[in-house]
Image (cartoon, helix red, strand yellow):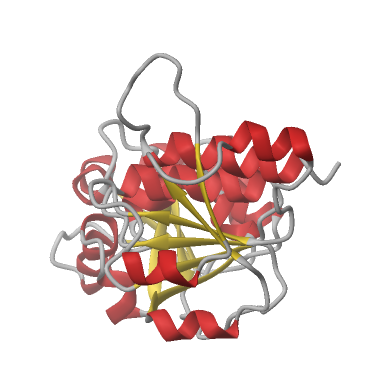
Amino acid sequence: MNLITSRDNPLVKTLRRLAQESNAYRKLGQFWLEGDHLCRAALQRGVRPARVVLAQSLADNAQADEWLRLDVPVTVMPDELFARLSGLESPARMGFVMAHEASLTIEPDAPTVVLDRLQDAGNVGAILRCASAFGFRQVLAMQGTAALWSHKVLRAGMGAHFGLHLTEGLQENDLDALALPLVTTSSHTGPFLHELLRSGTLPTHCAWVLGHEGQGVRQSLVARASLQVRIAQPGGEESLNVATAAAICLHASATGAL
């Protein structure tokens, strides 16, 4: 184990950037996973860390033994120092440094979710969870979408990242690589989702396009789509949160194939 006590240590500075700057992973080729749940989710998917980081109080505890057995470098630091780099209100006392290599590929036939300029990290992470839960194994993020591997999206995704093929920073013509029909969502236009599901005409093998929280899906992507769908809202609200809409649409599409 390597003990670090100085906040000016280069590794501490790197960890602080990874934990607090949304785009740092793109520059540093690493990302930071903090907490037992996220770290276990990575291991369960066969993704191993480049480094384990432990707060001193945990390193001195028998609970740390499982992390020490991973046969990767281990860094220990005082709890106060760990808390300074943590992105959580209640620091989790452990985390992984993970290697990151940006994916540049698109799987043409994989059930897909396309994110068109979504800004809120919580929404993006929640949609990744929905995609993983309902069998959409690929998520493509258009340029302008919140950084997929940022600490906030990782926390909101709750481990879903490690079961998905993720590609970000895409331009519209990159979607030409998809061999699936595009289905877009709308608040006011197109047939109702429940009617398509009832009639058996809702696509099950497709790419769902989810748009910006305020502006929705850009018109040029709507023009590319085979279908535009809306969700009935008998209570009279003008629109739904995009992550809520995603859960409804992806669940309907997935269960329509059963």
Residue 105 in view in this figure: yes
What residue occupies the far right of the structure in this picture?
258
Residue 64 in view in this figure: no
Residue found 55% across the figure and 45% down from its top:
129
Query: Is 69 placed left or right of 210 in the picture?
Result: right
| Residue 167 image position (x, y, % from top left) | 49, 74
| Residue 22 image position (x, y, % from top left) | 25, 61
Residue found 26% across the figure and 54% down from its top:
119
| Residue 25 image position (x, y, % from top left) | 33, 71
Query: Is 219 placed left or right of 48 in the picture?
Result: left
| Residue 258 image position (x, y, % from top left) | 86, 41
Q: Front-most of 244 and 59?
A: 244
Is 104 situated above or below 64? Answer: below
Q: Front-most of 237 and 10?
A: 237
Is 220 situated above or below 44? Answer: below
Q: How many marks?
A: 0
What residue occupies the far top of the structure in this picture?
235
Is 178 situated above or below 117? Answer: below
Is 206 situated above or below 84? Answer: below
Q: Front-most of 113 and 77?
A: 113
Query: Is 26 placed left or right of 249 in the picture?
Result: left
Residue found 17% across the figure and 60% down from its top:
6
Which quadrant would residue 93 be assigned to in this image? top left
Q: Front-most of 71 and 146?
A: 146
